Amino acid sequence: MGSRVGSKNDWYCLCLDADAHSWRKDHPIFKGPFPVKMTVVNKPTPAEAFHYAHDYDGEMPKKLPMWKVQTKGYATDKGFRVGLVSRPWGYEDSPEAEYISSGVCQKSLNAVAIGRHANFFHWGFAASPTYMTDEAISVLANAIAYIAKFKGQGMIARKYNEGIATRATLNEFKYIPTKEAYKNMLEINDEANRLLQKMSKEVQAKQDRGEKLTEEEQYYLNFKPMQMRSHEEVVKLYMREYYDMFGMDEKAYASYFDENRDYFYGGDGVNKLVVDEDVKSLGIPNNDLRLIDTAIKMLENKTEVDKAKRILARYTLVDFPAAIEWRNWFEKNKKKMFFTESGGWVFLVDSREPGVNDYVAWEVRKKLNSLTMNETDERNPVAVVVSREVLQSGEQFVYIKVKIHPGFHIYANVASDAPFVPTKIDIQLPEGYEKVGGLQVPAARFYSQSGTTIYDETVVFGQKIAGKGPGTIECVISYQSCDNHICFPPTEQKFSIQVN
């Protein structure tokens, strides 16, 4: 449910046990309205957390203050429910999200066991109140009272890609090629082999006694020690294209990631970071608002316009045809803008007004930019491609992308005294589908004083739909294309899209 709407309360690991640690003691859920008297005990730091020491500032503590949330946990009570932690990286990079507490799990010490993203509250501990401590019951009741205050306050930043890289990923990239990381992997492999070998002997003894083995025990019976890859094989596997650059020189990896830290971009793919050469050429960090201001100035001054457009398309959710519109938008919103990595590596506006932070429109533009189209020329001035897309939010759209040859146009609105033919789009849906709202049309450009408007360059029409099942979507687009000298006869193109 959360990932469909872009919640930062994602599935990092189903591995949360019974104790909390690293909580924010001054947070309201520990203050009231119900009184909380927390019993805090110093306990050993979870062993698994040391595998993520490279992601921890400072030396990992040997012990941590903890308070018991549950009277039972999966580690001590076989078959007990397991809790869920969310990814910590970028959790708080938008104003409507707050980390509250971590807990004993098999991930990093900052994994989010309790947190809030907008009006979604994440209580990752799995036990019902029957198996909670009295103090945890009070904290849970306070959490319910606390989240009620955020009724109607939806998300600003949306994390549709659970595996999106953030700048914190660079710490892992620096660590993987090191001898220390490989030594740690060897120790983990050896320990796993030791434990599995022990299990194998116990199962073999059970079989020798003539006892029936479970399916899981059959697996242990056939155990063979896991062979560890060489250090170089590990680096090749996990560092891929970076290995071609730096081989086994761990200092070179560290220098590269440190020197380019301000220019890495992680908005595409899973756990992927690449240096944005456009941004690096300007010498401005991509999370610095000066970047957007500079790109707009480039449009205003007509210098490196293509680069400016790429930067603005990559780091904002909006799109404007003219520099003056970009400038007006920026000046209006710059005091409320912030940068989110987990939310897509974009600048957002701290506002919940409809249309201000439009992820749907942004995703539409990205998808449509990837669609290939036929080339246009003076004899064939219009190319059309029609596509049905299912967005990460789960919403479905039919898109009509129209590319118009330079110097030509097609008509949007035609004045009553004009002889031209307006562009029309007819979409017929199969049984089981319906249109949601009206056709979304692009902005048109003024053409004549009588009220005729036109489309030129590349424009996109969209129709939101809902439904499921097999069938065929039929789409017909009719238009007339002209330049300043001639007009072609009205044209009609038909497209069919199969849906499953």
Image (tube, rainbow, N blue to C red):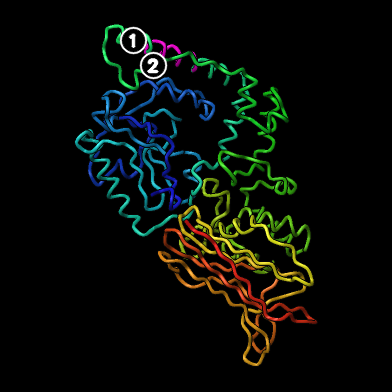
Mark 2 Cα shell of 10 Å, populated few (<14), some (14-19), many (≥20): some
| Spatial separation of the CA atoms under disc 1 and disc 2 | 9 Å
Q: Which residue is mark 2?
A: 220
Q: Quadrant of residue 150?
A: bottom left
Q: Is residue 295 left or right of residue 148?
A: right
For the residue marked with disc 2, what is the amino acid?
Answer: Tyr
Identify whether 29 is placed above or below 338: above
Which residue occupies 56% across, 56% down?
363
For the residue marked with disc 1, what is the amino acid?
Answer: Glu
Which stretch is magenta?
A: 189-199
Q: Which residue is mark 1?
A: 202
Which residue occupies 21% across, 33% down?
131
Which residue occupies 65% across, 93% down?
417
Secondary structure beneath dot 1 equals: helix
Which residue is more in the foreground, 221 or 2?
221
Which residue is farthest bottom?
417
Mark 1 vs 2: CB contact within 8 A: yes
For residue 169, the mark is none
Which residue occupies 31% across, 49% down?
146
Secondary structure beneath dot 2 equals: helix
Which residue is more in the foreground, 264 or 193?
193
Asked if the stretch drawn in magenta spans residue 28, the answer is: no
Which residue is more in the foreground, 457 or 118?
457
Which residue is more in the foreground, 1 or 143?
1
Q: How many marks?
A: 2
Identify whether 342 is placed above or below 326: above
Residue 167 rendering spot, x and y as whole percentages: 58, 39
